[in-house]
Image (cartoon, grey):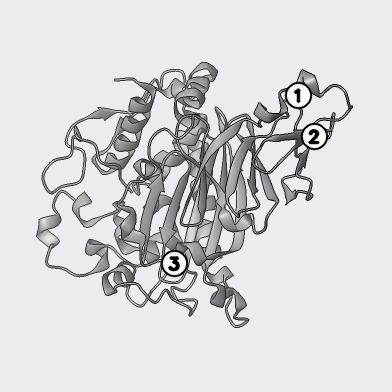
Amino acid sequence: MSHEHPSDPTAGDFNGLRQRVDTLPSHWYFDQDHYQRELRDIWSKQWVYLCRAGSLPDTRSYRTFDLVGQPVILLRDESGDIRAFYNACRHRGATLCSDASGRLPPTGISCPYHAWNYRLNGQLARIPNAGRSHFVDIANTHLHSIAVKVWRGFVYVNLAGEGAALGDNFNANLQLFDHWPLEDLVVGHRLTKRIRCNWKVFWENYNECLHCPAVHPSLIDAVPIYRRGIMEERDDPNWRSTADRQDPLYKGGLKAGAVTWSTNGESLGHEFSQLTEAERALGYHYMTSLPSHYLVLHVDHVRSSRILALSSEETELEIEWLFPRETLADSSVDIMNACNFSARVMQEDAAVCELAQRGLHAAPHTHGTLMPEEYDVWRFQEWVRQSLGVR
C-alpha cells in the first residue's frame, strides 16, 4: 500500500516507524481555508480517477461529474476516443448536459439555454440567429478541454493539464498487474456511499491495519496476519524470530483453504488464467493512485474504489466489483459472495472514519501521534505535505 520516500524514518529490514512522529494538524481535516488549499494544490493538479471506459460504450455516450466543484463531461467521440471538457457553454456558462449519463444526438452537444452547438471534439459548430455569427470567432471557439488518460480501462482526468505522467501517481510498478486482464473486466456490482469524514481520514484508515482486530472480524479471519494489527511480515520488529514459520499469521496471505476474498473464501470459478503461483498464493494485491483510486486484485475478481472529496468533512466512496465476462454470464455463480464480503469491510471502515472525524474537533487535540505500524500513514501524510509545499 505504501508510497516510498527517500527520508523514510523506517530503516533496515523492519517496516515500522523507528521514532516518534506527529500526525497532520487536526484543523487540516475540517478548516475551510485549508480545504480550499487542498482542492487547489492537490485535487486540481493530480490525475483523478473518474470511471471505467466501458461506462462510455458507444460513440456519443457521455457521463457528467462534479469534480471538487468543477463540472466535467466525459464523452466518446466519433473515432472512439474519450474526451473531457468543462461542462459549461462558452456563451454564458450554462450547463450543457444535466443528466448523469446518456447519449448525445448526432448533431453533437447543444446548449439547452441559447442553443449553441458543439462537435464532439469540443469545437463550436454553429450558433443560432443568422446575422450574429460575426460576434463569435466560431473556428477558434472550443469548449474548455480537460486532460484525460485511460490506463487499462480506467479513465483519469487532470484539471491542470497533462502535468506529471499518470504513472507517477501509482504506488507500484504497473507491470506488476500485467497478468490481470483489467481492460476486459466488466462491472458486476456497484456501491456508492457518502462518508462523513475528510478524504484524508479515509486514506489514513486504508493505510494501516492497526484497527483491523477491533473493527473487521470477517477480514481478520480471512487474512490472519491482519489479526495481529499489521499488514506484512516485516511490520513486526521481531519478525526474524518467526521467519521460518509458513503460517499466514506470520507470512501474510489468505487463511488455509481460502483462495479469494469472499464470504466463504471460495473462488467464483472463473479465475484469471495468466496469474503466477506466487500471485495466486498471496490472494490479494493492492494498487494505489492518490488522491482518488485504489484497486484490490484477487484470483477471480478486482475491486475498484474511487474516493472523491465532497467537502472538508464529507467524502464519496464508489466501489465497483469487476469480473470476467464469463463470470457474469454464468447463472450458477453468485457474485454477491465476493461483493458482500468486501462491502461489509468497507461499511466498517466508513463507521470508524466518521468516529475519527468527529473526535478531531476536540479543542485540545491539535495533532495525534503515529504508532510504529502506521508507517504507511506517515508516508501518505508526507505526500500531502509535499503536495502542499509544507515541511
In the foreground, 339 or 301:
301
User: How many neighbours does mark 3 have within 10 angstroms: few (below 14), some (14-19), or many (20 or more)?
Assistant: some
The residue under label 1 is 91
Alpha carbons under labels 1 and 2: distance apart: 9 Å
**Left or right of 375: which side holds 121?**
right
The residue under label 3 is 181
Q: Pointer 1 and pointer 3: residues touching (CB < 8 Å)?
A: no
Alpha carbons under labels 2 and 3: distance apart: 39 Å
Residue shown at 39%/77% (left/top)? 273
In the foreground, 20 or 106:
106
User: How many neighbours does mark 2 have within 10 angstroms: few (below 14), some (14-19), or many (20 or more)?
Assistant: many
Tell me if residue 241 can be seen: yes
In the foreground, 57 or 302:
57
Closer to the observer: label 1 or label 3? Answer: 1
Q: Is residue 66 above or below residue 108?
A: above
Please report whichever mark, 1 or 2, sits nearer to the chain's N-terminal start.
Answer: 1
Looking at the rendered image, the quarter that the C terminus falls into is top left
Q: In this view, does 10 lie above or below 135?
A: below
Q: What amino acid is found at the position of numbered circle 1 in the picture?
A: His
Q: What amino acid is found at the position of numbered circle 2 in the picture?
A: Cys
Alpha carbons under labels 1 and 3: distance apart: 43 Å
Q: Is mark 1 on a helix, strand or loop?
A: loop
Residue 195, horizontal then vertical, whole percent: 57, 40
Residue shown at 46%/18% (left/top)? 363
The residue under label 2 is 111
